[in-house]
Image (spheres, helix red, strand yellow):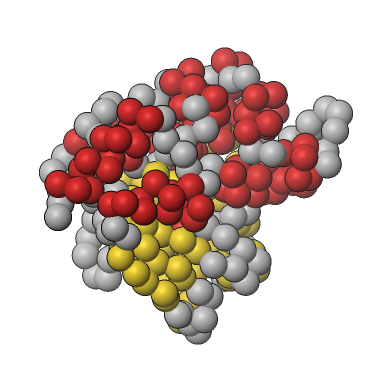
Amino acid sequence: MWSGDELDLDAYLARIGFERNYGVGGELRPDLSTLYAVHRAHTGAIAFESLDVLLGRPVALDIRSIEEKLVHGRRGGYCYEQNSLLAAALERIGFEVSGRGARNRTRGDALLAVTHAVLVVTVDGEPWLCDAGFGHQGPREPVPLGSPGTEVQQGKWTYRIREEADGVLVLCLLRGGVWRDLYAFSPQHYHPVDYVVLNHYSSSHPLSSFVGRVIVQRPGDDIRRALVGRELSLLHPDGRAEQRSVAPGELLDVLGQEFGLRLPERDAAELVGIYLAED
């Protein structure tokens, strides 16, 4: 399903610093401890970014292209790339992985289309939400789906799943003492070909939030970082947000220092040029 047999698993594990940071050697097993370790390593190493959309380049979702970009090229990606890569790795290890389509709920009462890709991984008969592609507000680790309402602590951030009618599940984040809906998803299974359709909208439609602006984000155990357009935000669990404007001359340094992202020379020059053109 996820082309895990085509993935260079050793290169992926090296990219996310899996053995270096988690000290796991020998054969990988499809158990809960491995799921936690891989998910956490992935979200810590690979930044969320949609810079190819801004640069007018196609976003390919075949596993070879994703591996070349995110693993060997050490770039980041957005949800379809991130979770397709994670799904391929988990499938290769032996996990049961299925896709879901989610509806973003971070923009108040606005009803948005289903455009977010997430994964459900089953371990010992229990389902877990896995998502390496929701940017700075996304979970660092798997979230259990079997007991809605259970609060899950990840670093200084707290998540829970809320259940609605018709089997719809909602991922919620506690920030500043207030529970906030992040996204909702139904039991309907999504396949890689479905993400190709969603990716086309997200990467090309004029109403897509990714078209025409820089979006680079990174979750952390303490501070969450987001660069959207010219604004760099540092978000804290207590609800505080530090914000400042990023000038074109410091853009590349910010990408490297805050998000661990270094672009090839051509991409970097084009990106700075786009920033300068907005002045």
Residue at the image point whose x is 57% and y is 60% from the top: 220
Residue placed furthest toward the bottom: 177
Q: Is residue 168 left or right of residue 229?
A: right
Q: Quadrant of residue 57?
A: top left
Residue placed furthest toward the right: 26
Tell which of 188 and 193 is nearer to you.
193
Q: Is residue 165 left or right of residue 35?
A: left
Percent position of residue 150, x then y: 62, 69
Percent position of residue 67, x then y: 51, 24
Residue at the image point whose x is 46% and y is 70% from the top: 235
Residue at the image point whose x is 62% and y is 19% from the top: 8
Q: Is residue 168 left or right of residue 71?
A: left
Decide: is 102 above or below 245.
Answer: above
The quarter of the rendered structure image containing the C terminus is bottom left
Percent position of residue 265, x then y: 38, 30
Tell which of 146 and 240 is nearer to you.
240
Q: Is residue 174 visible?
A: no
Tell which of 203 and 14 is nearer to you.
14
Residue placed furthest toward the front: 249
Residue at the image point whose x is 34% and y is 36% from the top: 268
Q: Is residue 17 visible?
A: yes
